[in-house]
Image: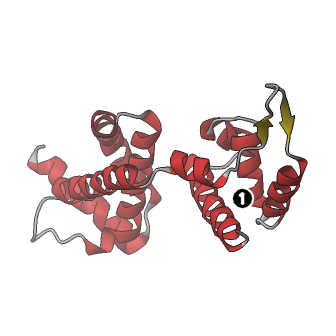
Amino acid sequence: MTPEQSQQLKQWLSDIALKRDKKAFANIFKSFAPKIKGFGMKQLKSESAANDLLQDTMSIVWRKSHLYDADKGAATTWIYTIMRNLSFDMLRKAQTQKEDSLSDDIWPIAEVVDDSGEVFSDHLMSQQIAQYLDSLPEAQKQVVQGVYFQEMTQEQLATQLEIPLGTVKSRLRLALNKLKQQIEENS
């Protein structure tokens, strides 16, 4: 990066911090988006995770630009440090949080096979699951129904509901935690 480009980047960060300048933010976004997304694809091995990394990094740049101190380092270093720390957080979270196993733990088997090999539905279990779902806020209920009953991917659901993918993930995580708590309380 040339000294002129470095100075321009510092100016953009200052404009964001002092004036909430959207044009300056757009310039930073255009400059860093391909690099951040590329890093995310390499480290996180998923396009949706790379997009989340980009969104989260740029959100922090927008919200915390006032914390950037040119005396402590280059603006690029500051932005890449935010990106790197977020990617580490995402990797740790992916390792420790197993949403798939959580869903397996809370969803009781709705079909049971009898001795003759015939499959029948457990209607009491279905009613109980419906009651648990009805206790959720409508937004969380929609996400759970879309993912588990309509067998939609989170990306498909985000498109259908016209909300960000991160919102779908957050709502699903909250809903699953609430459902798990309800099932444990009633067991």
Q: Position of residue 75 (x, y in %)?
A: 19, 58
Q: Position of residue 74 (x, y in %)?
A: 13, 59
Judge by depth and name the residue closer to the eye, 47 or 22. 47
Left or right? Give the position of 120 relative to 49.
right
Local packing at callout 1 (Cα closer than 10 Å; few below 14, some 14-19, many 20+) is many
Residue found at x 64% / y 69%: 181
- Type of amino acid at the residue the image marks with label 1: Gln
Residue found at x 69% / y 35%: 152
Judge by depth and name the residue closer to the eye, 160 or 131. 131
Spot the residue most to the front. Answer: 115
* Location of residue 25 by image quarter: bottom left
Judge by depth and name the residue closer to the eye, 166 or 61. 166
Colouring used for the render: secondary structure
Judge by depth and name the residue closer to the eye, 29 or 46. 46
Q: Position of residue 23 (x, y in %)?
A: 43, 54
127 in relation to 43, above or below: below
Left or right? Give the position of 111 relative to 108.
right
Label 1: which residue? 140
* Location of residue 133 by image quarter: bottom right
86 in relation to 48, above or below: below
Residue found at x 77% / y 43%: 110
Quadrant including the C terminus? bottom right
Residue found at x 13% / y 43%: 1
What is the number of callouts on the image?
Answer: 1
Q: Which secondary structure lies at badge 1?
A: helix
Q: Position of residue 165 (x, y in %)?
A: 58, 46
Spot the residue most to the top. Answer: 117
